[in-house]
Image (cartoon, helix red, strand yellow):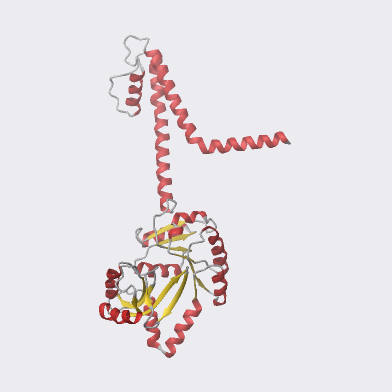
Amino acid sequence: MILRRKFYFWSSWMEMIRGKFKPLFVVAAILLSYFIFIEVIIYFESQNPDATIIDHFSGIWYTIVTLTTVGYGDMYPVTKVGKIIGATFVLSSFVIFGFLLGRINQFMQDYYEEKHLGFKGTQFKHHAVIIGWNNSAQAVLEQLLGVGRRAAIVTDKKDDVDLIKETYSPKEIFVLFADYNNLEILKKVNIQDSSMVFVNHPDDTAKLVHILNLKKLYNNCRFVVSLDNADLKSTFLTAGVTHTIAKNEIASKLLASYIFEPDVAAFSEEILSYAETEDDFDIKEYLVIEENPHCNKKYGDAYFEFKKAYNCILVGISKLKNGVRTLMKNPADDVLIEAGDYVLVITDRDSSLLLEKDFKTQEGT
């Protein structure tokens, strides 16, 4: 029994070594055969006074010229043994060429396949990561691209990779084909440097399990999910999800608003999406940095300055203290706007360009 176990151990170990290093063994065997060939042909040719292949330099030159099919004719074997060996070398060169071309072709195919499937990774930073591809994910992606944000998409279907790459520019999106259970591979989408991770699985249970596993490896990431069951919001927030959105809840609020206040509903729906035209409005948030002209000013004073300078409406401030965000909707006039705060404004496309120029930052977190 012990001998059998040892036999299985060594046989499996040798099989693994053979499979892993097989290309190296083949290359080593070819090189060894090549140098043996040179030694043998030099040995026999050097015994003939009319021979030109008499040393290692001439032997290597002859083999290179022959192998590359150039055939200058300045060197050639003159002995019978030399001609037999030379003919053998010429015939074997077809095998060598076939092997080398096959390996190069296979390497290029593997390289482009890995690149196509995203295995080479991306250098995106401050981007959104979307895990799970469907119509809902595509709708979210369209909104992200509309405000100039880049995204990395993770899908477990190869057909999705082709479709996404045909539809969007590689400057805007990165696609990774991966098993959702393989959490380590998410480093390829640079998940640790993303601004938000949108987990988009078919059901809420799968989303929760996936997020709990993700947080073990990427605890600093910010997660957002859309829920089919609004009753699970507290469960997801307890699990560490930053933002939860209940699909039915949003739809029911908009529907009720359209019934009783159709203009309010239409305006609400418009400002939730990005401004496509000059007449469209959007609600945006901007980080306040030290260089911001409104930094350390009171909210009441800034309110009128925003309207006068940018023709937009300041509607709130979000303050971040010790990792906790506090949203202040239309705060008191004496509230101070400080560096590190986010200001929320209703603006059109042209006004947002003026804001970004003066604020020296783009919208979003």
Give the camera-side residue of 89 and 340. Answer: 340
Whole-percent x and y of residue 63? 35, 24
Vertically, is 170 above or below 326?
A: above
Q: Quadrant of the C terminus?
A: bottom left
Q: Quadrant of residue 83?
A: top left
Residue at horizontal 44 percent and vertical 71 percent from the top:
320
Residue at horizontal 40 percent and vertical 26 percent from the top:
91
Whole-percent x and y of residue 213? 56, 61
Q: Quadrant of the N terminus?
A: top right
Q: Quadrant of residue 211?
A: bottom right
Q: Is residue 33 left or right of residue 46?
A: right
Vertically, is 330 above or below 293?
A: below
Q: Is residue 211 left or right of residue 164?
A: right
Give the camera-side residue of 338 and 89. Answer: 338
Q: Quadrant of residue 106?
A: top left
Whole-percent x and y of residue 224? 48, 69
Whole-percent x and y of residue 54? 35, 14
Residue found at the far bottom of this picture: 260
Residue at horizontal 66 percent and vertical 37 percent from the top:
8
Q: How many marks?
A: 0
